[in-house]
Amino acid sequence: LGPHAGGGGGAGSCDLIAVSPCPSAGLAACRLGAGPAASRIGVAYVRARALLVEERWAEASEALRDVVLAGGGGHEALAALGVTFSEAVGQAAAALVRDGRFEEAIGLLAQVGTVGRAELILLQADALLCLERPAEALRLLPPAPPADEDGVAVPPRTAARWYNNRGCLLVCASLLAEAEAALLRAVELAPDEAEYRFNLSLLHWRAGERRQACEGWLVFRGHPADATAATYRRLADETTPRAADAEGAQSHASGALHASQAAALDRLALRYFEELRSSEEFPGYWDARREVAHGSHEPGIALY
C-alpha cells in the first residue's frame, strides 16, 4: 500500500494506499455530570480533541492514551460526553499513526482489544502496513467485517473502507480476482468515494481491462464516454495539476487521494479514449500507434 511514512521499498510497497479512519476534528458537547475524577478526564479529553484539530499528533495521542487507559473513570467521562470507548481508542491510535508511531499504535490496540471493533481492526492493519508487514495486515481483515460486540453490523461506510483496504492488501498479495471482488463491494457501498473508484479503475488497467478501467473512471468524474478524439485531447490538455506541478505524495496515514494522482488517472483515461476514437476515425494512421495506445502509463498514479 503505497508511499507511506515508513519509507519506500520492501514488502509493503505495492503502489497502493488504503483509507485510514482519521481522528474526528469536531468537539463533542460537554455534558459532564460525573464525579471529580471523571470530570478531570472529560476536560482532558476535550483538550485532546482540540489538539487533534490543530494536528498536534504527538500531544493529542498522549492525552488520548491517558484517557482511554484511565479505567472506569475514563469510561464514565466519555459516556458523559457522548463518546464511546472505541471511538476514543480509535482517535488515540489514529493520532499515533499520524505521528509515525506505528508500533505504539499496535501496542495500544492490543492492550484494549479489537475483537468486534471493525474501526480499530482497520487501524491495526493500517499500522502494520506502515511497518511494511502487509501479510500480517491482510490476516486481520477477513472477507467481511465483523459485527460489533452486540451483534450489530458495521455501518456501510465502515464496511466500504474494510473492503477497500482488504482489496489493496490482496493486490499486494497478487490475488487480483479477490481484490477486484473486494473493491467492487467497496464501490457498491460507497459509490461517491473517489478513492475506491480510483483503486478499482487502476486494478482493471493493470489487469488489462483498460477500456473498462478508463470508462468507469471517466463516468465517475463526469466526463463523456462518447465524445470525439478532439474533445478527449482537449480535456486531457486542460487537466490539472500536471505531474511536474504536483505537490509531494502525502503520507500513507493520510488516507486521502491526492489531486495530482486523480488528475494523472484523468489524463491516462482521456488519452486512452482519444486514441481509441482516433483509431475508429483514422484506422490506417492509428494502427501504427496501437502499441503505444495500449501500453502508455501516466506517472504518479498509486492506489489509495
Image (cartoon, grey):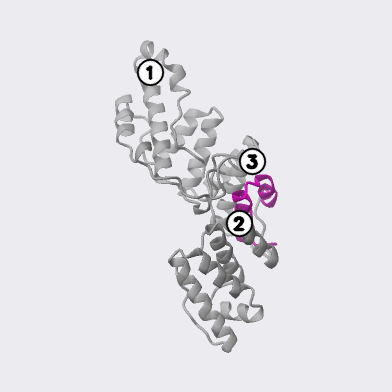
Q: Quadrant where the N terminus lies?
A: top right
Q: Which residues are magenta?
A: 114-143
Give the residue type at disc 2: Phe
Q: Residue furthest bottom?
A: 35
The residue at which mark 2 appears reads as 102
Q: Magenta residues: mostly which secondary structure?
A: helix
Distance in Å between CA atoms under marks 1 and 3: 42 Å
Question: Where is residue 248 shown, x and y percent of the image?
Answer: 42, 45
Q: Residues within 10 Å of mark 3 (few under 14, many from 20)?
A: some
Numbered label attached to residue 280: 1
The residue at which mark 3 appears reads as 11
Q: Residues within 10 Å of mark 2 (few under 14, many from 20)?
A: many
Q: Is residue 242 visible?
A: no
Given contact means CB atoms under 8 Å apart, are the residues at marks 1 and 2 in contact?
no
Q: Secondary structure at mark 3?
A: loop
Tell whether 107 sits left or right of 245: right
Distance in Å between CA atoms under marks 1 and 2: 52 Å
Which sits in the foreground, 284 or 291? 291
Give the residue type at disc 1: Glu
Question: Where is residue 97 shown, x and y percent of the image?
Answer: 56, 58
Q: Secondary structure at mark 1?
A: helix
Q: Nearer the viewer, mark 1 or mark 3?
A: 3
Residue occupying image coordinates x 60% and y 70%: 65
| Mark 1 / mark 2, whichever is N-terminal | 2
| Mark 1 / mark 3, whichever is N-terminal | 3
